[in-house]
Image (tube, grey):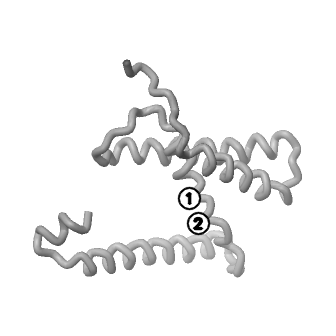
Amino acid sequence: QPDLVGRMGHSVEGYRCLALGVSNTLAAFAGVWAVEVNRYADVHMGFGMALTAITTVLIGAHLNPLPRKLAFSAGRELTSVGIGVGAYFLAIQLCLYAGLNPLYLKLVLGLFLIFFLKTQHQKRPQLGVN
């Protein structure tokens, strides 16, 4: 919340720069680690990782059975991301188990993402709420 940081007397831009620096540092360490584990580097190694991350967050937000509240809840958001990651990689495994050519896997996963983007704002029933 930029307003809260500003009211506390701290620099909003300073915190924003710090957050970007930490996130880019973690991304760089992850890339270095991947190269170290694989023993080689390739230009296309991280291709699609941002899309995978966005897809898992969208799927998790759509499938999370916990009720939505106005206030932020770290536990609810982490649960959403966990559900999204599980559903995304379950879809990958089901496609490969069904015999889908791995060349077409990105197409199917792209359609999976489009489905969740189109149905994201549809009202879903709340279970157990009267």
Please state which amino acid type lies under the numbered disc 1.
Ile
| Marker disc for residue 50 | 2
Would you identify the image quadrant in which residue 79 lies?
top left
- Residue 94 disc label: none
Left or right of 83 in this view: 20: left
Q: In this view, does 84 lie to the left or right of 80?
A: right
User: In the rendered image, which quarter is residue 52 located in?
Assistant: bottom right
Q: In this view, does 64 lie above or below 22?
A: above
The amino acid type found where label 2 is placed reads: Ala
The residue lying at 31 percent from left, 43 percent from top is 70
| SS type, badge 1 | helix
Please state, as top left, top right, bottom left or bottom right, where the C terminus lies in the image.
Answer: top left
76 to 21, vertically: above or below: above
Marks 1 and 2 sit apart, C-alpha to C-alpha, by 6 Å
Q: Which quadrant is the N terminus positioned in?
A: bottom left
Classify 10 Å Cα crowding around label 2: few (below 14), some (14-19), many (20 and above): few
**Badge 1 is on which residue?**
54
In the rendered image, the residue lying farthest to the front is 122
x then y, percent, for residue 22:
37, 74
Q: Residue 67 in the image: state x and y as whole percent.
A: 39, 33
Q: In this view, does 84 lie to the left or right of 97?
A: left
- Badges 1 and 2: C-beta atoms under 8 Å apart? yes
| Residue shown at the point (68%, 76%) measured from the top left | 39
- Which residue is rendered at x = 54% and y = 50% of the image? 58
Decide which of 70, 61 is in the foreground and name it.
70
Dot 1 surroundings within 10 Å: few (below 14), some, or many (20 or more)? some
| Relative image position of residue 98 (x, y in whole percent) | 85, 40
Secondary structure under badge 2? helix
Seen in the picture, residue 42 relative to 108 is either above or below; the reply is: below
